[in-house]
Image: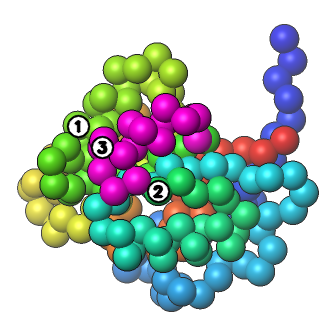
Amino acid sequence: MATPTTTPITSELDSSPTDATSDSADLAQPVQPALHHGPPGPSVLLVDDNAELSELTAALLEEQGITVWTAEGADSAAERLADGRPDAVIVDLVMPGVHGLQLLIDLRGHPECAELPAIIISALPPGETRDRAEALVRAMGSADFIDKPATTRQLIVALGRLLTVE
């Protein structure tokens, strides 16, 4: 069976660094005026207990042509996933109740979400705990572990590596 030809979402951004220390883009500054052309773009489920930051991040990603569903925790994420499957998830690691690592474990345990691309965002300070958390989420198939607050550029680049559009 022939594989369809795909093009990365952001070919010119693929070489951009994702390290927060080398990314000077302001969180509110658009990455590029017109990243999205044509049919509806990819969809992302953003799971973060910080509603204000989640709303801002969603608005900035939507400006780039990405459909964003938001959830304030694991329970609301499960409700959103019952309504449909996004192309990727962005999950905050540290949340009250079910933390992001457990949510990722739960997602990997469901056949329809086992291969769902995931990006983890975290405000954990550098150190052993953060290093162990990053190693665990990467071992579970998370494509990126991004320091919080993540810039629009960091998220677009990470999503560009995960998703392709026809």
- Tag 1: residue type? Gln
Q: Is label 3 in contact with label 1 (beta carbons under 8 Å)?
A: yes
**69 or 34, nearer to the observer:** 69
- Tag 3: residue type? Ala
Q: Assess disc 2: are there few (<14), some (14-19) or many (≥20) residues with their C-alpha within 10 Å of its C-alpha.
A: many
The residue where tag 2 is placed is: 70
Q: CA distance from mark 1 to mark 2?
A: 18 Å
Q: Quadrant of the N terminus?
A: top right
Q: CA distance from mark 3 to mark 2?
A: 11 Å
The residue where tag 1 is placed is: 102
Q: Name the outermost residue toward the left.
A: 128
Residue occupying the point 80% across, 64% down:
36
In this view, the mark in front (1 or 2) = 2
- Is most of the magenta stretch helix, strand or loop? helix
The residue where tag 3 is placed is: 74
Indicate the secondary structure of the residue bearing disc 2.
Answer: strand
Decide: is 152 above or below 115: below
Residue occupying the point 53% across, 67% down:
58
- Tag 2: residue type? Thr
Bounds of the magenta segment = 71-86
Please state if 153 lies on the left or on the right of 96 as rendered. right
Q: Quadrant of the C terminus?
A: top right
Q: Assess disc 1: are there few (<14), some (14-19) or many (≥20) residues with their C-alpha within 10 Å of its C-alpha.
A: some
In this view, the mark in front (3 or 1) = 3
Q: Position of residue 22 (x, y in %)?
A: 44, 79
Query: Which image quadrant is residue 4 in?
Result: top right
- Report the label total: 3
Q: CA distance from mark 3 to mark 1?
A: 9 Å
Decide: is 93 above or below 149: above
Residue 84 among magenta residues: yes
Residue occupying the point 20% across, 56% down:
94
Q: Position of residue 38 (x, y in %)?
A: 90, 57
